[in-house]
Image (cartoon, rainbow, N blue to C red):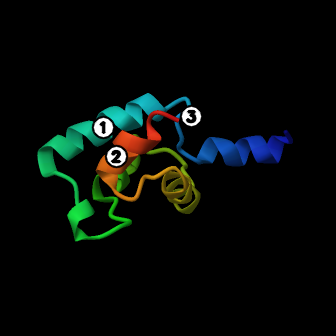
Amino acid sequence: MSRMENEQRERVLSPSHPRWQEFIEKLGRFGSETGCDGHLGPKRYRNAIRAMAEMGGDFDIEETFKFFEDHGGYCDCEIVLNVDGW
C-alpha cells in the first residue's frame, strides 16, 4: 500500500482505525443521551458527527459515512449494531 493510500485509510473511521473504540464509546454515550434518529429515515448521523467533532480528528466524513453505509450503518444505532463488529 502506498503512503498516500495509507494516509487516506487513516482518515476513514472504521473498526480498524486506532481511534475506533474512542468513537464507539462517544457514540454510545451520546446515543443514550439523545436516542437514535433512524426513525426519521436513513443517513441520520447526528451523534456520529458529534462524536467525530469532539474527537477533533482529520476524518474524511464523506468516505467514513460511505464505509458505514457499505457495512449496514445507515444511522447512529446501526453503526454500533452493524459496523462495530467488522
Q: How far separated are the C-alphas under marks 3 and 1?
A: 15 Å
Give yes or no for contact between labels 3 and 2 (Cβ–Cβ under 8 Å). Answer: no
Disc 3 marks a residue whose amino acid type is His
Give the structural element (helix, strand or loop) at label 2.
Answer: helix
Q: Quadrant of the N terminus?
A: top right
Residues at circles 2 and 1 in contact by the CB criterion of under 8 Å: yes
User: Helix, strand or loop at disc 3?
Assistant: loop
Q: Residue tagged by mark 3?
A: 17
Residue drawn at point x = 13 percent, y = 45 percent? 33
Q: Three-letter amino acid code at disc 1?
A: Lys
Give how far across and how far down residue 16 sits, in percent: 58, 32
Earlier sequence position, callout 2 versus callout 1: 1
The residue shown at (23%, 70%) is: 40
Q: Which residue is mark 1?
A: 26
Instruction: Check disc 2: other Cα within 10 Å, few if <14, some if 14-19, many if 20+.
Output: many
Q: Amino acid at mark 2?
A: Ala
- Residue 28 in the figure: left or right of residue 5: left
Residue farthest to the right?
Answer: 2
* Vertical comparison of 69 with 55: above or below: below
Q: Secondary structure at mark 1?
A: helix
Q: Which residue is mark 2?
A: 51
Pointer 3 local density, CA inside 10 Å: few below 14, some 14–19, many at least 20: few
- Left/right placement of residue 39 relative to residue 2 reads left
For disc 1, the neighbor class at 10 Å (few under 14, some 14 to 19, many from 20) is: some
**Pointer 3 or 2: first along the chain:** 3
